[in-house]
Amino acid sequence: MNVAVTYEDGGIFQHFGHTKQFKLYEVDGSEVKPGDVVSAGGVGHGALAGFLKERGVDVLICGGIGGGAQTALAQAGIKLYGGVSGSADEAVRRLAEGTLACNPNVQCSRHGGHEDGSRQCGAHSCGGSCAR
């Protein structure tokens, strides 16, 4: 299984549509092979689903994500684990173990900035659905 994580400085970037890079992993059973960091190439939101599909991604782990992007991922056949934070490597390890917790109500509708001035969805109640 190929897994992508929205990525920044070792952690899970908290706004899918604004992610600048992904860390891509290959998971075989409970074994996680070292991941590679790839640039998102400046595409955003719905276009990122195609970007991930072109790279053979089966599963996405991210923080906040909007409904349109969730739909694009579902249409691309990519399972979503949203509302996740912390270390990217640790999240993929937990996914491989079957213990990754995610937020089934993850939703971010505040694109273009937030009332606190941040462009990150972790700062408010963003959190789609968890793949199971």
Image (cartoon, grey):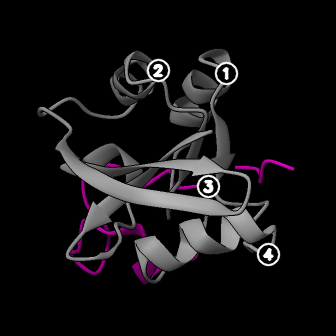
Closer to the camera: disc 4 or disc 3? 4
The answer to whether residue 124 is above or below residue 26 is: below
Residue 95: quadrant of the picture: bottom right
Percent of width and height locating residue 99: 79, 75
Magenta range: 107-132
Residue pointed to by mark 3: 107
Percent of width and height locating residue 71: 63, 26
Callout count:
4
Residue lying at 79% horizontally and 60% vertically, measured from the top left? 104
Residue pointed to by mark 2: 53
Please report contact status of discs 4 and 2: CB closer than 8 Å, yes or no: no
Q: Earlier in the sequence, mark 4 or mark 1?
A: 1
Residue pointed to by mark 4: 99
Residue lying at 51% horizontally and 51% vertically, measured from the top left? 65
Please report contact status of discs 2 and 1: CB closer than 8 Å, yes or no: yes
Q: Amino acid at mark 2?
A: Lys
Q: In the depicted view, which residue is nearer to us: 31 or 4?
A: 31
Specify whether residue 64 is painted magenta: no
The answer to whether residue 120 is above or below residue 69 is: below
Please report contact status of discs 1 and 3: CB closer than 8 Å, yes or no: no
Compared across the picture, whether 17 is left or right of 125 comes to: left
Residue pointed to by mark 1: 77
Q: Earlier in the sequence, mark 2 or mark 1?
A: 2
Q: Amino acid at mark 3?
A: Gln
**Any part of residue 126 in sight:** no
